[in-house]
Image: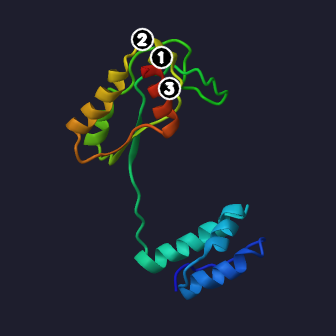
């Protein structure tokens, strides 16, 4: 059937899962925990690809996303980040229109530039963030919005009060 090369794994917990997958059986909670806990990502990928090919043949599906950040000021100071700044350097969400015109299906709000933002706490009113999301949704009603995480909602709520 699908996948031309044989299944290989160093994790014996994946062998019975492979047998279930090839038989078209539903996986259980223990199987899910084994998949989550394994370091053999290639074997997990092989299993996922086998199911994809069985269901869809040689087709692959994907989403095109764009991350929008209303500011680049961040107090998280992650060492790996080349994006965040300590001081406000301008609005970064203006590129959404071009992205949607180029086939973007989802708009994400990404990074800690909103939730832990000094500018959000001091200079930008709470309404700014509401207007940002509602304005984008009004301009692009067919685009799926993934705006704020629960941590960000909690932070903005504390700034608001």
For label 1, the residue is 121
The CA span between labels 2 and 3 is 14 Å
| Figure check: 134 above or below 20 | above
For label 3, the residue is 113
Badge 3, how many Cα within 10 Å: few under 14, some, many 20+?
many
For label 2, the residue is 123
Q: CB atoms at circles 2 and 3 under 8 Å apart?
A: no
Q: CB atoms at circles 1 and 2 under 8 Å apart?
A: no
Q: Report the front residue among 94 and 77.
A: 77
Eye-nearest disc, 1 or 3: 1
Residue 132 place in picture, x, y as percent: 31, 28
Image quarter of residue 26: bottom right
Looking at marks 2 and 3 on the same chain, the residue that comes earlier in the sequence is marked by 3
State the residue lying farthest toward the front: 161
Badge 2, how many Cα within 10 Å: few under 14, some, many 20+?
few
Dot 2: what SS? loop
Badge 1, how many Cα within 10 Å: few under 14, some, many 20+?
some
């Amino acid at each position: 059937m699908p996948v031309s090369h044989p299944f290989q794994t160093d994790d014996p917990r994946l062998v019975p899962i492979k047998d279930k997958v090839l038989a078209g059986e539903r996986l259980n909670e223990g199987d899910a925990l084994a998949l989550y806990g394994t370091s053999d990502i290639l074997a997990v990928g092989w299993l996922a690809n086998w199911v994809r090919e069985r269901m869809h043949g040689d087709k692959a599906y994907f989403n095109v996303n764009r991350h929008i950040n209303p500011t680049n000021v961040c107090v998280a100071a992650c060492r790996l980040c080349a994006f965040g700044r300590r001081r406000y350097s301008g609005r970064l969400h203006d590129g959404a229109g071009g992205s949607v015109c180029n086939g973007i299906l989802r708009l994400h709000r990404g990074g800690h530039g909103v939730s832990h933002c000094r500018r959000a706490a001091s200079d930008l009113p709470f309404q700014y963030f509401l207007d940002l999301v509602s304005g984008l949704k009004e301009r692009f009603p067919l685009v799926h919005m993934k705006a704020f995480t629960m941590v960000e909602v909690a932070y903005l709520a504390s700034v608001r009060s």
